[in-house]
Image (spheres, grey):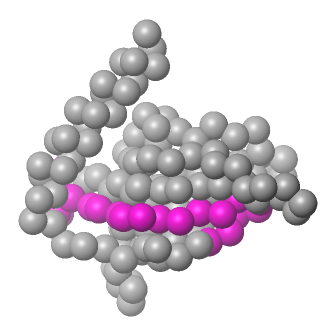
Amino acid sequence: MIHFLKSVTLLVTLLAFGAANAQAEQFNIAILQGLDKVTARVSTFPAPIGQTVKFGTLEIITRTCDKRPPEETPESAAFLDIWEVRPGEPAASVYRGWMFASSPALAAMEHPVYDVWVLDCKNAGDTTPK
């Protein structure tokens, strides 16, 4: 039942986010943050749309990244594909879906070693603070 409620909440959030972003600017880089739970090391890294970035044994492809306009409630969201790639083993999908900067637990990746979440969406060369 809890999983169903999370799914319904995620769907409502996606619909509201999509409606608000109908005329929004397109962004080409997602700013992600990752936690290695073994070493307690936190890393912030850019993930260009359509390119594979590595974080530990994870390979991450950002499919899209959207952000609400400044006059609305702040929100960034990215659609991510995340695989775990270990030598000698086939790649295993560990996450595919939307992640929201304001609610990382809403659609969290479940992995024993790593956490990954979205911080912001930017364009190449954009140096403005989030």
Label tally: 0
What residue span does the magenta drawing correspond to? 53-73
**Residue farthest toward the right in the current orientation of the protein:** 88
Pick the residue in front: 33 or 96: 96
**Main SS of the magenta segment?**
strand
Q: Position of residue 128 (x, y in %)?
A: 34, 79
Q: Residue at x 12, y 52 (%)?
A: 20
Q: Residue at x 84, y 47 (%)?
A: 38
Q: Relative to residue 89, is residue 21 drawn left or right?
A: left
Pick the residue in front: 58 or 122: 58
Quadrant, the N terminus: top left
Question: Is residue 52 positioned above or below 84 on the image?
Answer: below
* Residue 53 appears in the rendering: yes
Pick the residue in front: 81 or 9: 81
| 66 part of magenta stretch | yes
Q: Position of residue 106 (x, y in %)?
A: 43, 34
Q: Position of residue 15 (x, y in %)?
A: 19, 41
Q: Position of residue 37 (x, y in %)?
A: 77, 45
